[in-house]
Amino acid sequence: MKLFLLCTLWILWCFMHSYLVTTDTTIWIKKRFEKKFPFYRIFYNLFSFFTVLPLLYWQHALPGPIIIPLSHYLIFFKYIALIMGVIIVAGSFATFDIREFAGIREAKSKKNQKKEMGPVIKKHGFYGIVRHPMYLGGIIFFMASMTHAPLPQCAGYLILAAYMIIGTVREDRRLASELGSVYSNYQKEVPMLLPGITRRKIGPWKRI
């Protein structure tokens, strides 16, 4: 019962984490809270951080059998994968303005709209290897965390890894829809997740 509740809460967290930054949701919030909208990114990041902490604590506190047991030799490779995932995520963050990513720059400027500029695609660093390195790093980290872990942790990390994969596809389609030919050319040049293996182009969402 506790495991079922934990999985349900993880799925709910993933849904809210994605729903709160959809285009329709942000447009609705901007219309209703126009003056406070520059602070929305900060609120979103704080909400995500403080709601994920109890789930992480609870899943580590719950007992359970070890799933996907590893030998001492294979555990070494697990930690290599964990470090690799962290490096990829950190390297991806290095490409961005951290203050802007966190919402601090927008909140300080207190402007609801940025200066009109043409779409710009960052192609240096990890973004010249795959289109979504931050997601790739997260997937590697969570899949490695699933191994040699109690059932509650394995289930939680499995949900997060699946969420990352789904998020990659959704994000790719959203960017294709918003940036048009600029992103379409980027899709042709750089693979989505697996360097040198797939260069699949995912088009924009089609509304029926």
Image (cartoon, grey):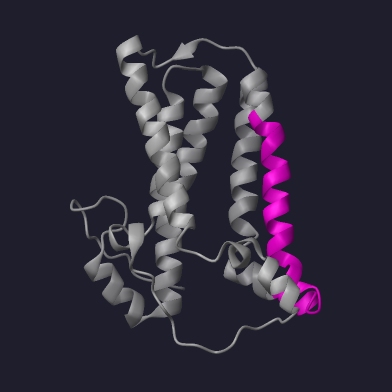
- Residue 43 is situated, as x and y percent measured from the top left of the image, at 74, 59
Look at the picture and state if 52 lies above or below 134.
above
Residue 134 against residue 187 in the figure, above or below:
above
Q: Would residue 14 appear left or right of 204 to someone viewing this image?
A: right
Find the magenta span and give its range.
28-56
The image quarter in which residue 101 lies: bottom right
The residue under the point 65% across, 17% down is 62
Pick the residue in front: 35 or 121.
121
Q: Residue at x 52, y 18 (%)?
A: 151
| Residue found at x 58% / y 70% | 23
| Residue 77 percent coordinates (x, y) | 32, 24
Q: Nearer the viewer, residue 50 or 199?
A: 50
Membership of 99 in magenta stretch: no
Q: Residue furthest left?
A: 196
Residue 40 drawn in magenta: yes
- Compared across the picture, whether 96 is left or right of 33 comes to left
Dominant secondary structure, magenta = helix
Tell me the quarter of the image containing the N terminus: top right
Is 207 on the left-hand or right-hand side of 48?
left
Residue 67 is situated, as x and y percent measured from the top left of the image, at 44, 16
